[in-house]
Image (spheres, rainbow, N blue to C red):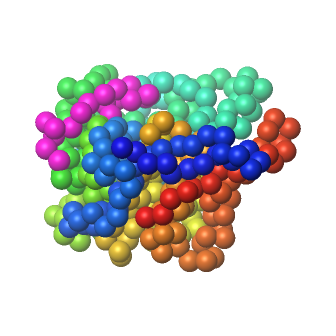
């Protein structure tokens, strides 16, 4: 059963709580720590994007198109659709010689609430590059072009690019593709469901790929490098993923997934971490839980903890901005 990870306090009273599951795994597949069910099956959602981006390299798309770190990072991203994100998507599509309309991710408001309000107030015309998954879709299109696959139906489960991506994710997470559950993600492509244990294992290997075959090792290293060199592309201004990567100076990559999933790969320590908040809350429960895990694992220096302090025990505010409580992790690994 999931355990209580986070309390939401209003004044002196716990008003709500969030349960969840956590697992820490090394590259050999050993569980080093866990809370709740380390084998809970859930969808990896957008936390899977860095693993899915492996196919950009395995397909030969990166070699053909010469993607920059910024371009690779946004393929791994759930970005806010800020100006620099949209410009980056356009640059990728120009390399692919494809129109914006080739992206089948939909045109959505920013996943950052404050920026979404600005878009509404300004009557912004939404286009596919506003979608937080447009980078992932761009990488899929690139792989299609290199392999001669059709691009009109690339989002379909039985499309060869989706089968290639499933194979790449399954290999690094030590899964059999037939055992992976397939759902449909918010951006209309297949999303993979499997145990948290395997998510953590995949991230441990993404950050520490020395025992992978050369082509996979090179792809992992490039993805890790790109996310660390261009952290602003992974989320956006003051986004947790971007700030976490930026302030940890090349020691890790971390990625959010919808419905309260978070995965981290830590370089040098050969470990990966996966978290699932049971009720799917990621707007308040997830970041404090991630920070508590990193602190308990002694991953962060005092300076790094201070730089990320806003995410550790965030204030709980009301409609006029008054602090009325806090969101606090209540567990230890």
Q: Is residue 199 above or below residue 155?
A: below
Q: What residue is shown at x 36% (from left), y 43% (from top)?
A: 1
Q: What residue is shown at x 38% (from left), y 25% (from top)?
A: 188
Front residue of this view, candidates 146 and 237: 237
Q: Is 190 contained in the magenta span?
A: yes
Q: Is 303 contained in the magenta span?
A: no
On the question of residue 100 being in view, the answer is yes
Front residue of this view, candidates 256 and 26: 26
On the question of residue 85 being in view, the answer is no
Q: Is residue 318 left or right of residue 2?
A: right
Q: Is residue 109 above or below residue 328?
A: above
Residue 32: where, in percent of width, then height? 31, 67
Q: What residue is shown at x 21% (from left), y 37% (from top)?
A: 180
Q: Quadrant of residue 46?
A: top left
Give the tally of numbered discs: 0
Q: Is residue 160 left or right of residue 233?
A: left
Residue 65: where, in percent of width, then height? 35, 49
**Farthest front residue in view:** 13
Q: Is residue 9 left or right of residue 97?
A: right
Q: What residue is shown at x 72% (from left), y 25% (from top)?
A: 120
Residue 68: where, in percent of width, then height? 44, 56
Q: Is residue 239 left or right of residue 183?
A: right
Q: Quadrant of the C terminus?
A: bottom left
The magenta span reads 175-191
Residue 248: where, in percent of width, then height? 53, 70
């Amino acid at each position: 059963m999931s355990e209580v990870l986070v309390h939401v306090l209003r004044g002196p009273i716990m008003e709500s709580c969030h349960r969840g599951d956590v697992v820490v795994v090394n590259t050999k597949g050993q569980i080093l720590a866990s809370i709740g069910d380390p084998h809970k099956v859930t969808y990896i959602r957008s936390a899977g994007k860095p693993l899915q981006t492996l196919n950009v390299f395995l397909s030969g798309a990166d070699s053909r198109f010469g993607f920059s770190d910024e371009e690779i990072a946004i393929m791994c991203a759930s970005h806010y659709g800020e100006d620099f994100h949209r410009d980056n998507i356009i640059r990728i599509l120009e390399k692919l010689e494809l129109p914006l309309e080739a992206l089948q991710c939909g045109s959505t408001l920013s996943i950052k609430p404050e920026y979404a309000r600005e878009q509404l107030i300004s009557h912004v015309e939404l286009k596919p590059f506003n979608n937080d998954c447009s980078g992932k879709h761009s990488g899929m299109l690139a792989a299609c072009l290199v392999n001669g696959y059709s691009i009109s139906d690339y989002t379909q489960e039985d499309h060869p690019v989706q089968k290639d991506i499933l194979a790449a994710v399954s290999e690094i997470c030590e899964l059999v593709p037939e055992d992976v559950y397939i759902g449909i993600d918010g951006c209309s492509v297949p999303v993979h469901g499997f145990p948290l244990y395997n998510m953590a294992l995949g991230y441990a290997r993404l950050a520490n790929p020395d025992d992978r075959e050369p082509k996979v090792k090179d792809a992992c290293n490039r993805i890790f490098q790109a996310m660390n060199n261009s952290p602003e592309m992974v989320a956006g201004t003051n986004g947790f993923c971007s700030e976490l990567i930026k302030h940890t100076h090349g020691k890790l990559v971390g990625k959010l997934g919808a419905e309260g999933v978070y995965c981290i790969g830590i370089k040098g320590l050969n470990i990966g971490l996966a978290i699932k908040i049971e009720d799917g809350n990621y707007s308040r429960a997830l970041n404090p839980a991630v920070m508590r895990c990193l602190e308990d694992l002694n991953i962060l220096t005092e300076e790094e903890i201070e730089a990320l302090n806003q995410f550790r025990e965030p204030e709980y505010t009301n409609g006029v901005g008054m602090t009325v409580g806090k969101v606090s992790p209540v567990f230890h690994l």
